[in-house]
Structures are given as C-alpha cells and as structure tokens.
Image: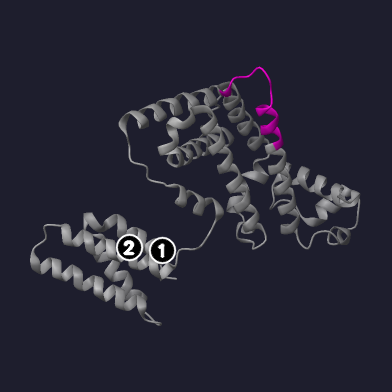
Amino acid sequence: MNITKKNIVKSATKLFKEQGYLSISVQDIANDCGIAKGSIYKYFSSKESLFSEVFDQCQNMYFVGIKEINLQKGLSLREKFLQQIVFRFQYFTEYKYILVEFTELPIQQNEKFKPLRQRVRARLISWHKECLESLYGDKIKPYLYDLIFIYRAILKEYLFWIIYEDNLLSMEETAAFILAKMDILVENTIRGHSNSIINRSAYEHYINGENTVNKEQLIDKIIGEAEKIISKQLYGKSYQEELYELITILKTEIEKEKHSEALICAVLSYLEKEVELKSIIIQLKNILLINERGLS
C-alpha cells in the first residue's frame, strides 16, 4: 500500500475508533495526516469508501489475532475456545465504533459497503462453525447449523452487554459461562434427539447472501401454508369458506400490477387474528414489507 494511503487509513482508523463515524469528517482525517483534504480523494472516492477500507482492515486484524491464539502451543481446544471468546470481547469493545456501531449508520446501505459487510459476516460465521466442530466433534453434526446460530446469538448479546451496560461483566467469567452453557446445550440437544431447523443448504444461502429465492414463489409458498393450516383446523364450514375467500382475495390483489394497499392490509389484519395463522401471516407481512403506512 502506498505510504500516503497507508497513513490516511491509519489516521482514519484512529479517529473512527476514538470518536465514531458520524463525528469525524474527511477534513479531520486530513488534518491528522497533515495533508490537504483533496489528497484523500486521490485514494478514496468518499468518506464511506475510506470507512470501508478501515472496516476491512480491522476485521482482518481480528482474524490475525484469532489465528495467533489458535496456533499457541500447550493450550487445549477448550482453552483456545475460551481465549477466542475473550479476545472477541476485547477487540470488539476496543473497536466498537468501527465494528459494532456502524449498523445503525447510513453506510450500512451503501452499495459498496454491503457486499463487504456480507463477506465479513460469512467469514465470522464460518469461523464459529470451525470452532464448534473442533471442540465438539462429529457428535454435533446433525445439529451443527442450529448450534452455530445459537452460539452466535449468545455471543452477540453478551458483547452488547459488555460494551454498553454500566453493570460491569468480567470478560473471562462471561466467556467461561458461555462455554459452560454451550456444553449443556450440546448435550441436551444430542440426548433429546431434537430435529434440526437449519440445514446445510439454508446455512450456505444465508452466509453467501444469495437472493436465489424468488419473492413471488416465496409469497405463494407462505399462502399455500396458510391454506393448509385453515384446512386442518376445526372451523365451522361457513367460517372456513370465509377464510378461504379472504386468501383468494389476497392472492388476487397481490398479483395486480396496481394493488390496493388498504385492502391487502385489511385482509392480513383479519387473518392475523386467528391464533393458528398469526405467525405465518406475520411472516407474509414481513415479505411484503408492510409498515405502519401500509405496503411499501
């Protein structure tokens, strides 16, 4: 990397790390580097582009640290696992303005940043997969993908607690607690012969950010599931026919090029009142991107 570009990234990393994305301007970074503002634009087209470079480098350094832990001699797999959790807490706390708080910023929707974020997410999840496989072995194979996402969710929530809550938690004790609970979860899952929810195909689709599922096909599938639920319930015949008629109205309206948002919202709201249909109708509303103002 060019010396000037390297210095720009170094200054940007320091300032973003200390004060956050919104608080820092391109001029601030230029001042810290001791160069003209225009010099930054020779290497980066925008502040967003510069932040993307910083974000990428910070993630790469995180994985360098993880790799170093993994290569340490004299540590058991369990000890390495624990140290990796602690390191994650330490590193993400130190770089919270870069690695955590960006999620609420406009850059999250930036077309150049989105694929970078997707690659980073895939890399993190794949690393969780390797860690769990190395620690628990083949016995978790039937439940591997569900355990990955449970572990990921636990890590995320405790990380946010450590970063933002005033009630201080020991990173080391929290890591040990998480691992102990994962032990229990793994053993109970295996003993209970639970059915796996997430399969390999769904996992790969998720981490690769593929949009191979056609929206119209997904809507048809959900509506089909709603019809199956209606057919299995002990409704009176007239009420069952009424629900089927509403489903037909819904399908017809969705298929129209210029549909009535008010009508779709009204039908969905009515169907959602049925306890058995509530969850799947909420999923359908989510797919249709319904908000308080209607269909968007």
> In this image, 148 relative to 103: left or right?
left
Dot 2 amino acid type: Ile
The mark found on residue 287 in the picture is 1
- Give the image quarter of residue 36: bottom right
Q: Amino acid at mark 1?
A: Ile
Please provide percent x and percent y for residue 67.
68, 33
Residues at marks 1 and 2 touching, judged by CB atoms closer than 8 Å:
yes
Percent x, y of residue 21: 69, 51
Magenta-drawn segment:
64-77
- Quadrant the C terminus occupies: bottom left
- Tell me what residue is drawn at x 35 percent, y 28 percent: 188
The CA distance from mark 1 to mark 2 is 10 Å
The image position of residue 139, as x and y in percent, is 43, 30
Circle 2 sits on which residue?
222
Q: Secondary structure at mark 1?
A: helix
Residue at 53% of width from left, 59% of height from top? 210
The residue lying furthest to the top in this view is 74
Instruction: Please say whether residue 291 is visible from this viewpoint.
Output: no
Say above or below: 221 vs 93.
Answer: below
Residue drawn at x 9%, y 69% is: 238
Is there any visible trace of residue 28 in the rendered image? yes
Disc 1 crowd, CA 10 A, few/some/many (<14, 14-19, 20+)? some
Label 2 SS: helix
Q: Is the residue marked by circle 2 packed among few (<14), some (14-19), or many (20+) residues within 10 Å?
A: some
Left or right of residue 292, residue 3 in this image: right
